[in-house]
Amino acid sequence: MKYYNTKTKETIWENHIETKKGIFFLDSLTKEQREEFSLIPIVENKALEQPKDKYQYIKTTTEETEEAYIITEEIADVDIEMAKSIKLEELKKIRESKIAEPLNNVDVRNEKDIDNLDGSIRYFESLTTTGKIKWTMSDDTDKEMTKAELEEILKNYALRKALIFSQYQAYKTQVSSASSIDAIKAIVWG
C-alpha cells in the first residue's frame, strides 16, 4: 500500500521511511505510528474505461481526508479551446494530405517535387531535342511529357493548393465560431 505524508504533502514511494528513531517498514506500522509520522493510506479510484476519442481525457482529482488521500480518475471532456486546437490540427493534416496528392500521376508531395517541375519547365529546351522529356510518375512508371503538360501540372497544383487553403480557412472559421464540442466534432472535411 502507498502512503501520503500530510505534513510534507508527498507520496511515499518506498516501502519504508527513515526517521531519527530508525527505519520503519510501512506495512508493519501501527495506526498510532502512522499518525505520529503523519501518514495516511492512498486510495486510488481508477477510471474503469478509456476515453472514447481525442476529445476526452482521464481527469485526476485528489482529496485529503483524515482517513485517506483519495485519488479519483474519471473520463472528462477536454475544454472547448483544447477541442478547437485538436480539430484544427486534424484539419491541417487533411489539408497537407490533399495538397500532396499526385496530379495526373505526377508527384507534388513536397517542395522538391515542385522545384523539379519548375526547373524542368524553365530549362526544357536544354533538356530535350525531341520536345518531350521522360518523367518518372508517382506509380514509378515513365512517361514522355511535353513542356505544356508540365506547365499544366504546375498551374493545376497552384490552383488546387489555393482552393484547398480556401477550404481550410472556411473550416477554420467554423471551428472558431463553434460553441460546443459536439459542434466541433461535426466539422468534417467534405
Image (cartoon, helix red, strand yellow):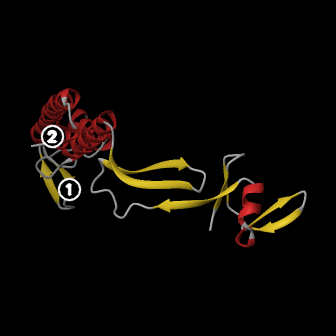
Q: Please name the residue shown 33% across and 48% down the image.
A: 76
Q: Please name the residue shown 50% across and 61% down the image.
A: 44
Helix, strand or loop at mark 2: loop
C-alpha gap between disc 1 and disc 2: 31 Å
Who is closer to the viewer here, 100 or 143?
Answer: 100
Q: Position of residue 163 (x, y in %)?
A: 13, 32
Who is closer to the viewer here, 175 or 72?
Answer: 72
Disc number at residue 108?
none
**Front position among marks 1 and 2:** 2
Q: Quadrant of residue 47?
A: bottom left
Please give the residue where the numbered disc 2 appears in the rendered image.
Answer: 187
Label 2 crowd bin: few (<14), some (14–19), many (20+), radius 10 Å? some
Who is closer to the viewer here, 30 or 2?
Answer: 30
- Sequence-wise, which precedes: disc 1 or disc 2? 1
Helix, strand or loop at mark 1: loop
Q: Position of residue 88 (x, y in %)?
A: 27, 37
Q: Position of residue 54 (x, y in %)?
A: 30, 50
Q: Please name the residue shown 58% across and 56% down the image.
A: 68
Residue located farthest toward the front when viewing the structure as drawn: 32
* Kind of residue at badge 2: Ile
* Kind of residue at badge 1: Ser
Disc number at residue 138?
1
Q: Please name the residue shown 19% across and 33% down the image.
A: 168
Q: Position of residue 21 (x, y in %)?
A: 90, 61
